[in-house]
Image (cartoon, grey):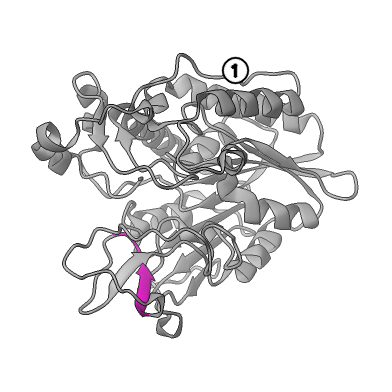
Amino acid sequence: MFRRLNILLSLLFLASCTVPPNSPRFQPSENLPPYEQESFDQYVRETRAWVADNRAFIGENHDLEIELNTPFEIRPAEPAQRGILLVHGLGASPWYFIDIATAMANDGWLVRSILLPGHGTRPADLMLADNEDWENIIAHHASLLAAEVDELWLGGFSTGGNLVTSHAYTDDNVDGLLLFSPGFYPDTNYLFLTPAISLFWDWLNIDEEDNIATYQSLPTQGASLYYRSVSTVQKNLETARFEKPVLMTMSQHDSVLDPNATLKAFQNRFPNRQSRFVWYGDTPQNLDDPRVTDLVSHLPERRISTFSHMNVLFAPENAYYGEAGSYIMYENGQNDIPRPVDPENLWFGAWGQSAAEKYHARLTWNPYFVELLDNIREVTVD
């Protein structure tokens, strides 16, 4: 769902392609769930019940859909001294962090992944959320986690990366950040129009909802919320450098963001020597920062042309998005090549990736996932 936000193109076709069907998925719930409970366990229980009551289910396995869209906590075997709060991206779900969360808990971390208001049920619920909801839920649960551990980290994917970075500028309890494809710099010049557009049109994009972990459709309010997160984090980055350790990842071929601007921001605004930037793609020109690691993203032996915005988070073994997972993102911005009948002829890449006689689905797993875990350990070392 959160692909290139070309607002101008959306405006040109708005009248013809953004009228939602008569479906519960495009009608908002009566309200959003509370998120300022006194304990994380209570928050999980009440949010799970709300998701169960309000979700417009896609498939027959309702329990699985509820599970993937419910906040979760994983505790290590021994009492934890370190904790991390993980925040997903626009249209995504807490489950996006399940592979990273499991690995970090095995390393002794107390890990929590929250549900941003407006998510987990139906795309229309993004119309009910505002920026204060997103900022307040992170502040509340960061405070709850800080009370239980000696060392607090925040992690975020895409829009979640913007939100946790902005919070870290205001919260002295935060000891560091893990940022996966952070959405600091969108690859569009028209995002600033979304707050105004949201006053007149409800939807920027209507798609078939067939993915139980991600919204495919985008209300204008959702794009507006992303814009506000961009505006806030860019102001923070312009005002002051972030001195604490950070891990940042980015694909050279990210179709949503400006990767080079993100790399430049890392080099100029995140000076901690312990910080690391993992770049998936060709070696950037004139790179002289030893904190930057580049990994080849063109892996033809695995039928991978490029890395996508989202694939960094998922292990190849992931049951839903993994290399042999049950869900494949066939819809990938190409219509001129027929989908292959034999899965062995399917290639993978970023949204919009195309090549002669190759049909590209979205890449949804990270071939370097083990290396990513090592990167996390390197940045978070005591």
- Which image quarter is the N terminus in? top left
Name the foreground residue: 312 vs 290.
312
Name the foreground residue: 51 vs 100.
51
Q: Is 350 in the magenta?
A: yes
Q: On screen, 82 above or below 52?
A: below
Q: Residue furthest right?
A: 78
Q: Position of residue 198 (x, y in %)?
A: 25, 23
- Which image quarter is the C terminus in? bottom right
Q: What residue do we see at 73% from left, 23% from top? A: 42
Q: Quadrant of residue 347?
A: bottom left
Specify start and end residues of the magenta stretch as a single range. Answer: 345-351
Position of 377 with respect to 254 (left or right) is right
State whether residue 284 appears in this view: yes
Q: Residue furthest bottom?
A: 301
Q: What residue do we see at 90% from left, 48% from top? A: 78
Quickly name the residue at label 1. Answer: 34
Q: Amino acid at mark 1?
A: Pro
Position of 363 with respect to 196 (left or right) is right
Position of 303 with respect to 354 (left or right) is right
* Helix, strand or loop status at disc 1: loop
Q: What residue do we see at 21% from left, 45% from top? A: 6
Position of 304 with respect to 41 (left or right) is left
Q: Position of residue 274 (x, y in %)?
A: 64, 59
Q: Position of residue 26 (x, y in %)?
A: 33, 28
Q: Quadrant of residue 231?
A: top left
Q: Is 106 in the magenta?
A: no
Q: Residue furthest top?
A: 30
Q: Position of residue 170 (x, y in %)?
A: 58, 29
Q: Few, some or many C-alpha atoms within 10 Å of disc 1 (few <14, some 14-19, many ≥20)?
A: few
